[in-house]
């Protein structure tokens, strides 16, 4: 469609020169925000400033990364995430350097899953009820399950048998 007359009484067709242009409110009159090249996203610059196009960076999507350590059973609450996560990715390792035990886990409001190297790095197991599992030898293990999702974070319920310490990092996705 070719615009040859004003779109409205306030936006003259002459400011829209290229397919993909967007009319925006300028300081006084409507202005043209030129269309961008592929794979750029429109980003607000706040009140009183025109939006810009830029590449989407993971840091701009609202992800949250944290790390911690745990050696006891019980509940642990993570607040300050800044949003209610829709999914969490967990990376965990046995705190004892001589053991080769690790865990990679995922949690959504519907389920927890992880894959774990256990028994000093000799057995790989899959679990569909834990987001973290460190199992040294069957008698010494610690596991975590996300049990609550809230507006600013989540809660993990930890279970421990014997003595075990887990160091973990997690990435929350919006």
Image (tube, helix red, strand yellow):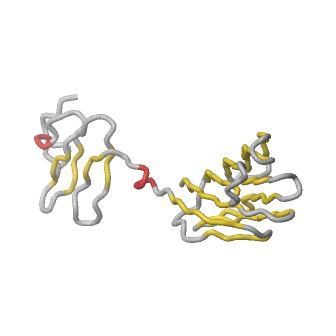
Task: Return the residue nearer the eye: 138 or 45.
Answer: 138
Task: Return the residue nearer the eye: 28 or 82.
Answer: 82
Residue at horizontal 32%, vertical 45%? Answer: 55
Residue 48, x across and y down, in percent: 23, 65
Residue 114, x across and y down, in percent: 72, 46
Task: Return the residue nearer the eye: 78 or 162.
Answer: 162
Does residue 35 sit above or below 111 in this rendering? Answer: above
Q: Is residue 103 left or right of residue 32?
A: right
Does residue 32 sit above or below 5 in this rendering? Answer: below
For residue 5, what is the image quadrant? Answer: top left
Where, quadrant-wise, is the N terminus in this rendering? top left
Residue 58, x across and y down, in percent: 43, 50
Residue 13, x across and y down, in percent: 14, 41
Quick one: which residue is furthest to the front in this view? 98
For residue 148, what is the image quadrant? Answer: bottom right
Q: Is residue 42 left or right of residue 18?
A: right
Does residue 162 sit above or below 11 in this rendering? Answer: below
Task: Return the residue nearer the eye: 115 or 56.
Answer: 115
Does residue 13 sit above or below 135 in this rendering? Answer: above
Residue at horizontal 13%, vertical 43%? Answer: 15
Where, quadrant-wise, is the C terminus in this rendering? bottom right
Residue at horizontal 70%, vertical 56%? Answer: 94
For residue 72, what is the image quadrant? Answer: bottom right
């Amino acid at each position: 469609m070719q615009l040859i007359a004003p779109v409205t009484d306030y936006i003259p067709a002459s400011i829209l020169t290229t397919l993909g242009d967007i009319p925006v409110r300028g300081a006084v009159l409507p202005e043209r925000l030129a269309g961008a090249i592929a794979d750029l996203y429109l980003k607000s610059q706040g009140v009183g400033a025109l939006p810009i196009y830029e590449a989407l960076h993971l840091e701009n999507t609202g992800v949250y990364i944290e790390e911690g350590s745990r050696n006891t059973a019980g509940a642990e609450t993570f607040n300050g995430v800044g949003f209610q996560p829709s999914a969490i990715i967990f990376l965990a390792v046995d705190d004892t350097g001589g053991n080769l035990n690790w865990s990679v886990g995922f949690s959504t409001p519907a389920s927890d899953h992880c894959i774990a190297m256990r028994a000093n790095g000799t057995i790989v197991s899959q679990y569909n009820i834990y987001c973290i599992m460190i199992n040294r030898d069957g008698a010494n293990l610690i596991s975590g399950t996300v049990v609550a999702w809230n507006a600013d974070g989540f809660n993990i319920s930890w279970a421990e048998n014997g003595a075990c310490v887990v160091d973990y990092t997690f990435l929350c996705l919006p």
